[in-house]
Image (spheres, helix red, strand yellow):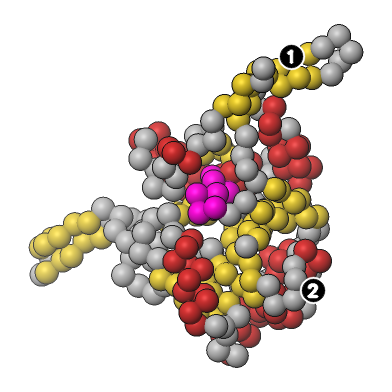
Amino acid sequence: MKVVILAGGLGSRLSEETKLRPKPLVEIGDIPIIEHVMNWYLHFGLTDFYLCIGYLGEQIIDYFKDYHLRGSTVRILPDGSVKTLECRKKPWTVTLVQSGLKSQTGGRIKKIKPFLNKDENFLMTYADGLSNIDINLLQSFHKSHGKLATVSAVRPTARFGTLKIEENNVKEFREKPVTEGGWINGGYFVLSEKVLDYISDDSSVWEQDPMKSLVEDEQLEAFKHYGFWQPMDTLREKNILNTLWDSGSAPWIPPKEDVIPIHVAR
């Protein structure tokens, strides 16, 4: 199944980082957040990626074009050619889709239509949200209901701690608990190619008319995810993710056995 990642927005709420580089290349630890997202899909055997790029998209192209050289041992030969002696490889195929500088999320999704077969299902998410969602269960859930679209539903962590008060006496304090309110869109969709008919043009915002129309047609089901989920919309949220990374127990990191070993040229 193809994995589509929206990676073309301006990232204006994270302008401290995105003035000079696209948001998908903002690093958590020493790895761009988009690669964290892709590594999670790789963990489930998914290797066919379509990145819908826009703002500073040439930097994303350069990153993946030169990926095999990053962190590698190379030899420069007299004729100027480069021989890679050691490198880490990922078993992915990455298609960089030009989705427009000003396109909205729906418009970016529609740009992948030439790459899809009729009625084909595909996975879709954003390049700035990390989770430990079970992709296999998500796909199975989508197949079970037979509708056009599945959205992962999450309950985010509250920004502040909560107090339980009885007659001015604090009975309980919880530091930034998971909210007990409504479920929200956590990204990590499974979609049928037919949902592209719900998207009008480049100005279409996926989270508005297309999703609302799918709801009206009873074609959208929610897969409830109770585990970790954290977007990176602001500098504060970037710092949260980096703190988790530095702790050595980031929930979105696949098991070590998924790491592709170094290849040594002979």
Q: Secondary structure at mark 2?
A: loop
Q: Which mark is residue 75?
A: 1
In this view, the residue in front, 242 or 44, is 44
Give the residue type at disc 2: Asp
Residues at marks 2 and 1 touching, judged by CB atoms closer than 8 Å: no
**Stretch in magenta:** 36-45
- At x 32% / y 61%, what residue is drawn? 178
Say which residue label 2 marks: 201
* Quadrant the N terminus occupies: bottom right
Task: Confirm whether the magenta stretch covers residue 53.
Answer: no
Q: CA distance from mark 2 to mark 1?
A: 48 Å
Neighbor class of circle 1 (other Cα within 10 Å; few <14, some 14-19, many 20+) is: few
Visible residue check, residue 164: yes
Residue at the farthest bottom position: 217
Name which quarter of the figure residue 254 lies in. Answer: top left
- At x 54% / y 46%, what residue is drawn? 39
Residue 255, placed above or below residue 167: above
* Quadrant the C terminus occupies: top right
Q: Position of residue 198 (x, y in %)?
A: 71, 81
Q: Is residue 99 left or right of residue 166?
A: right
Residue 247, placed above or below residue 45: above
- At x 15% / y 66%, what residue is drawn? 165
